[in-house]
């Protein structure tokens, strides 16, 4: 039985024509029920004929990820541990912000793989290893779960406004499914997200970088975290297999729209990459790339090999960049009280399950 969430609209149209003998407009109706009205049962599709609904129910399903655990921070950040159909678990996070009119809006951090093969030394997901790629329906299913949680049922004025592929996994190592997800997100008959509201973050994967840029389907963020090849090899050993100078050269020629800039993510690790020497070198290597810097203060996990930098070092690092005419913003850390950093909730859940049970 196929999960309809795994079809793009053209794929759903072809499948319904070939398998069910339904006209093209019927697929559009079903697609809108799936993504705009968030139907979980074929009987909800009231403008689809009963005969078609019965045929759909006989050979297809609508499978959302199952919510295994939810944690909400004091600041409103909400983290979900989701269980997929085969039992694999991934995380997604909702991050609140206030719009100019004072109303609350949300950004969602999406996972693209179960686990991660990159093994970055500061990342909880990296310690888990890689299990498998996520399918398009699993990637976009995270959005359905989040919207249902928020009661976000108005496609014409959604409160979930921005999406960032910065959760578990390296998106460009699941390029096929991520690109299918991006095309579906951009479809105005479905979730209808503007490319300007979607960001794909990569730690630097040569294959697929230009394809993403030429698609125009999302903004690009690059997890840099080190200004030299030597330091990158130390804290991001697998990402550093693509030499830093080659990555930077590729970013200089990356296709950008008007007013679009590449975002560099730089995680400040106490005593590792947060000193004045690193700030000067970072300013040098990004100065001729059309971009901006997000400075992220490390959120330590239990038994982590790194510490958070002091507030004084964070502010000094930021000032050195601004003094060198580099746009740098300290990204406010949210959800620290609920293990909101990537992979921390899943790691905590695994530890709970493996802990010996006390007997009465």
Image (spheres, rainbow, N blue to C red):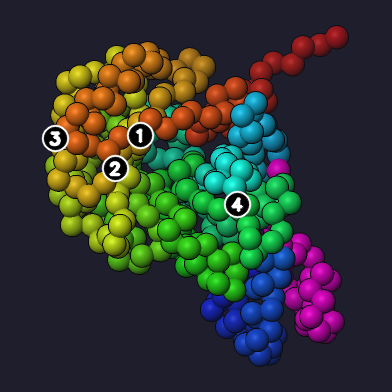
Which residue carries the number 2 mark? 292
Between tags 4 and 1, which lies in front? 1
Give the residue at mark 1. Answer: 329
Residue at image point 50% right, 34% down: 342
**Seen in the image, is 34 located left or right of residue 243?**
right
Answer yes or no: do the residues labelled 2 and 4 have beta carbons within 8 Å? no
The residue identified by callout 3 is 284
Q: Is residue 56 magenta?
A: yes
Q: Residues within 10 Å of mark 3 (few under 14, many from 20)?
A: some
Kind of element beneath mark 2: strand
Judge the density around disc 1: few (<14), some (14-19), many (≥20) Cα neighbours within 10 Å: some
- Quarter of the image with the C terminus is top right
Residue 267, by quadrant, is: top left
Instruction: Please state the extent of the stretch shown in magenta in the rendering.
Output: 38-67
Q: CA distance from mark 2 to mark 4?
A: 24 Å
The residue beneath circle 4 is 160
Separation (CA) of disc 1 from disc 3: 17 Å
Badges 1 and 2: C-beta atoms under 8 Å apart? yes
| Earlier-in-chain disc, 2 versus 4 | 4
Q: Measured from the top left, where is residue 67 in percent x and y?
A: 71, 43
Residue found at the very far front of the displayed protein = 101
Q: Is residue 164 magenta?
A: no
Q: Secondary structure at mark 1?
A: strand
Mark sitting earlier along the chain (1/3): 3
**Percent x, y of residue 251:** 21, 51
Q: Residue 16 appears in which quarter of the rendering?
A: bottom right
Q: Residues within 10 Å of mark 4 (few under 14, many from 20)?
A: many
Q: Is residue 100 above or below residue 234?
A: below
Do residues under tags 2 and 3 come within 8 Å of each other at their CB atoms? no
């Amino acid at each position: 039985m196929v999960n309809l969430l795994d079809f793009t609209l053209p794929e759903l149209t072809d499948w319904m024509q070939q398998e069910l003998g339904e006209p093209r407009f019927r697929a559009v109706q079903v697609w809108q029920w799936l993504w705009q009205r968030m139907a979980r049962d074929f009987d909800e599709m009231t403008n689809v004929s009963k005969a078609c609904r019965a045929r759909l129910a006989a050979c297809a399903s609508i499978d959302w990820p199952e919510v295994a655990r939810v944690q909400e921070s004091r600041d409103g950040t909400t983290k979900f541990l989701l269980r997929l159909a085969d039992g694999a678990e991934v995380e997604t996070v909702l991050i609140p912000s206030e719009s100019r009119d004072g109303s609350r809006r949300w950004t969602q951090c999406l996972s693209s793989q179960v686990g991660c093969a990159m093994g970055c030394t500061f990342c909880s997901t990296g310690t888990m290893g890689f299990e498998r790629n996520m399918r398009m329906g699993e990637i976009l299913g995270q959005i359905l779960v989040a919207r249902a949680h928020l009661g976000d049922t108005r496609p014409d004025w959604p409160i979930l406004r921005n999406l960032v592929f910065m959760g578990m996994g390296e998106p460009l190592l699941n390029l096929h499914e991520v690109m299918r997800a991006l095309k579906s997100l951009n479809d105005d008959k479905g979730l209808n997200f503007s490319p300007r509201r979607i960001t794909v973050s990569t730690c630097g994967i040569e294959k697929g970088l230009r394809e993403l840029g030429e698609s125009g389907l999302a903004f690009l963020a690059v997890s840099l975290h080190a200004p030299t090849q030597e330091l990158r090899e130390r804290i991001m050993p697998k990402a550093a297999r693509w030499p830093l100078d080659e990555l930077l050269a590729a970013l200089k020629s990356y296709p950008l729209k008007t007013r679009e800039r590449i975002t560099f993510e730089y995680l400040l690790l106490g005593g590792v990459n947060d000193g004045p020497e690193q700030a000067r070198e970072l300013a040098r290597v990004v100065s001729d790339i059309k971009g901006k810097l997000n400075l992220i203060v490390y959120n330590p996990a239990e038994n982590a090999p790194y510490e958070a930098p002091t507030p004084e070092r964070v502010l000094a690092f930021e000032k050195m960049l601004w003094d060198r005419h580099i746009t740098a913003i300290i990204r406010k850390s949210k959800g620290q009280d609920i293990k909101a950093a990537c992979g921390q909730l899943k790691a905590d859940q695994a530890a709970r399950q493996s802990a010996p049970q006390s007997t009465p």
